Structure formats: C-alpha cells, structure tokens
Image: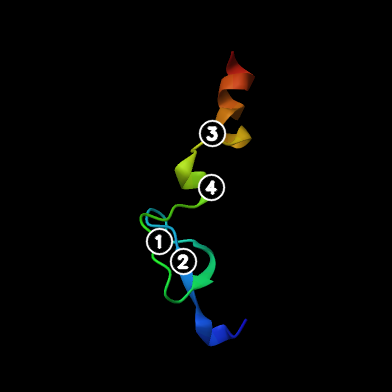
Amino acid sequence: MNIYDTKSITCKDCGKVIGEVDYDAEIILPRCGQCSNPIPDVKDKMPYLIYH
C-alpha cells in the first residue's frame, strides 16, 4: 500500500498513535488498549502488596 493512501489514527484520550487506516475510512472515538481497558499496572499495586 502506498504511504499516501493511509492516515495515522491517534487515541482520543492520551494521543498515542494506534496505527494506520485507509485515508477514506471513518473511525469514531479511537482508543488505545490502555485507555479502552484501564487495568492497573503491577507497579501501581506494589505499595499495597508490601504494606498489607
């Protein structure tokens, strides 16, 4: 596919680039994996695991 036939899609919440789609495609509310399913990171749970 030609580079001029695609456009980059960015996450609406954090602004990360998700990927590329056809230039004439219409994407409504694109979200990356972290923003669509916000699971706490292991590092976020560390103080809880240490003190309890």
Earlier in the chain: of badge 1 and badge 2, it is: 2
Q: Quadrant of residue 48?
A: top right
Q: Where is residue 34 in the image (x, y as percent from the top left)?
A: 52, 45
Q: Which amino acid does label 3 sit on?
A: Pro
Q: Which amino acid does label 1 sit on?
A: Ile
Earlier in the chain: of badge 4 and badge 3, it is: 4
| Foreground pick, 49 / 25 | 25
Number of other residues with Cα within 10 Å of mark 3, as a class: few under 14, some 14 to 19, many 20 or more: few
Q: Where is residue 14 in the image (x, y as percent from the top left)?
A: 42, 55
Give the Cα distance between marks 1 and 2.
Answer: 8 Å
Q: Kindly state the secondary structure of the residue where label 2 is placed.
A: strand
Residue at the location (48% across, 72% down)?
8
Q: Kindly state the secondary structure of the residue where label 3 is placed.
A: loop
Q: In this view, does 40 lie above or below 10?
A: above
Q: What residue type is labelled 4?
A: Gly
Residue identified by numbered label 2: 9
Number of other residues with Cα within 10 Å of mark 1, as a class: few under 14, some 14 to 19, many 20 or more: few
Residue identified by numbered label 4: 33
Give the Cα distance between marks 4 and 2.
Answer: 13 Å
Q: Quadrant of residue 23?
A: bottom left
Residue identified by numbered label 1: 27
Residue identified by numbered label 3: 40
Q: Nearer the viewer, mark 1 or mark 2?
A: 1
